[in-house]
Image (cartoon, rainbow, N blue to C red):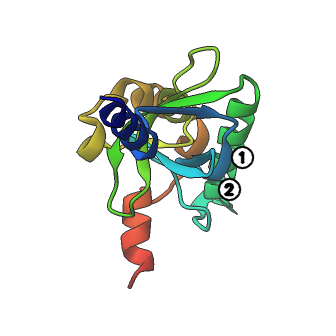
Amino acid sequence: MKLGIILVLASAAIADPVSITGRASIVDGDTIEIQGRRVRINGVDAPETRQLCKDEKGKSYRCGKIAADALDGFLASSRPTTCRILGNDRYRRLVGSCYRADGAEVAAWMVRHGHALDWPQYSQGAYAAEEAAAKNNRAGVWRGTFATPWQWRKASRR
């Protein structure tokens, strides 16, 4: 009996967690690292770190860096961050729905402030209202012109 309990506890300890909590470090605008584990924020796509967008005057700016910096500031104002793990992506990163200590949802905030886009392929439109509000308010990338992150990645592979 004791051996069975030990095996169950040992297998639970090495399995991927249902949730992970800790101080998040920023990888990019839609990926964080907590306790040494990379977590892709579910349902949204932020501009890539090297991606350029154009502002309302047509001037290029580093929208991917701005998205990552915005995420860093948002998370820093209410720590720790908790991510409910939903699975893994094709790069073997954890994929999760993440929240600050005060309960604010990370993905919704990023989209509402124009630092990420709703990614319907994965969100089923969960952040469409936040994206519409960002677009209406000309927040973040919506203040000018940009390629969607998925279009930018496809074009940059050529």
Q: Nearer the viewer, residue 23 or 50?
A: 23
Which of the 4 quarters of the picture holds residue 10? top left
Neighbour tally class for label 2: few under 14, some 14-19, many 20 plus, Cα within 10 Å: many
Quadrant including the N terminus:
top left
In the image, taking residue 37 as reference, residue 91 lies left or right, namely left
Looking at the image, can residue 4 be seen? yes
In the image, taking residue 155 as reference, residue 112 lies left or right, namely right
Neighbour tally class for label 1: few under 14, some 14-19, many 20 plus, Cα within 10 Å: some
Q: Nearer the viewer, residue 152 or 107?
A: 107
Q: Measure the C-alpha gap from mark 2 to mark 1.
A: 6 Å
Residue at label 2? 65
- Give the answer, above or below, for where 8 lies relative to 53: above
In the image, taking residue 91 as reference, residue 71 lies left or right, namely right
Looking at the image, can residue 56 be seen? no
Q: What secondary structure is marked by label 2? A: helix
Q: Residue at x 42, y 69 (%)?
A: 153
Amino acid type of the residue tagged 2 in the rendering: Lys
Q: Position of residue 123 (x, y in %)?
A: 29, 37
Residue 36: mark in rendering? none
Residue at label 1? 69
Q: Residue at x 55, y 50 (%)?
A: 37
Q: Residue at x 40, y 32 (%)?
A: 18
Which of the 4 quarters of the picture holds residue 80? top right
The residue lying furthest to the bottom in this view is 158
Q: Position of residue 34 (x, y in %)?
A: 61, 43
C-beta proximity under 8 Å, tags 2 and 1 = yes
Q: What secondary structure is marked by label 1? A: helix
Amino acid type of the residue tagged 1 in the rendering: Asp
Quadrant including the C terminus:
bottom left
